[in-house]
Image (cartoon, rainbow, N blue to C red):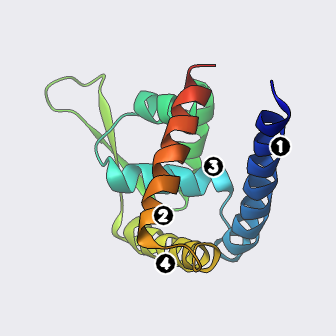
Amino acid sequence: MTAIDFTIERLILKAGNALNNIRIGDLEKSRLTSAQSETILFYADNGGKSIKDLAIHLKVSHQAARKLVDKLKDKTILESVISKKDRRSTSIFLTSYGQEICTTLKQRGTTVGETILSDYSDDEKKLLLEFLRRIEKNIDDC
């Protein structure tokens, strides 16, 4: 690892920690954890997917994903539907209340995103997005 690699890694960690702290503060208002928020956003984009799909997305155990889903079902944010074709298969969806919560989460996230990226041009944002996706892929390969 070169000195610049180390510096970039540290800056990414610092930015990630700062964003996570902002997110935690925002989520306290909704009485949600970061993992619950990410679960809601996952099912907003992937309604009907299974708990196994969530576990893969979050890179957590099946039990951890099940706990997240169960807690959000208790809060009436998620609901499960048993397949008519295969009773062993369960699909997870946002409830109408869950959709409202998701809209709020996205609005808050957009506000923070606009603030931290306000002095970047559209081309710079596209380039940054490309770099971040490559970094994410490289992390997945670790």
Looking at this view, is 14 or 61 the one in front?
14
Q: Which residue in the protein does label 4 denote?
A: 107
Among numbered discs 3 and 1, the one appearing first in the sequence? 1
Looking at this view, is 100 or 136 the one in front?
136
Q: Amino acid at mark 3?
A: Ala
Among numbered discs 2 and 1, the one appearing first in the sequence? 1
Sort mark 1 into few (<14), some (14-19) or many (20+) by Cα contacts within 10 Å. few
Q: What residue lies at 49% left-to-right and 78% top-to-bottom? A: 107
In front of the other: label 4 or label 1? 1
Among numbered discs 3 and 2, the one appearing first in the sequence? 3
Among numbered discs 2 and 4, the one appearing first in the sequence? 4
User: On the picture, is 16 further left or further right than 112?
Assistant: right
> For numbered disc 4, what is the local secondary structure?
helix
Task: Locate residue 11, reporting x and y percent.
Answer: 79, 51
Q: Are marks 3 and 1 in contact (CB under 8 Å)?
A: no
Q: Which residue in the protein does label 1 denote?
A: 7
Q: Which residue in the protein does label 3 denote?
A: 35
> For numbered disc 1, what is the local secondary structure?
helix
Q: Amino acid at mark 4?
A: Gln
Sort mark 2 into few (<14), some (14-19) or many (20+) by Cα contacts within 10 Å. some
Task: Locate residue 15, reporting x and y percent.
Answer: 75, 57
Q: What residue lies at 58% left-to-right and 37% top-to-bottom? A: 135
> For numbered disc 2, what is the local secondary structure?
helix
Q: Are marks 2 and 4 in contact (CB under 8 Å)?
A: no
Position above or below: 142 against 131: above
Q: Which residue in the protein does label 2 denote?
A: 125
Q: How many marks?
A: 4
Residue 140 location, quadrant: top right
Among numbered discs 3 and 4, the one appearing first in the sequence? 3
- The CA distance from mark 2 to mark 1 is 21 Å
- The CA distance from mark 4 to mark 1 is 32 Å
> For numbered disc 3, what is the local secondary structure?
helix
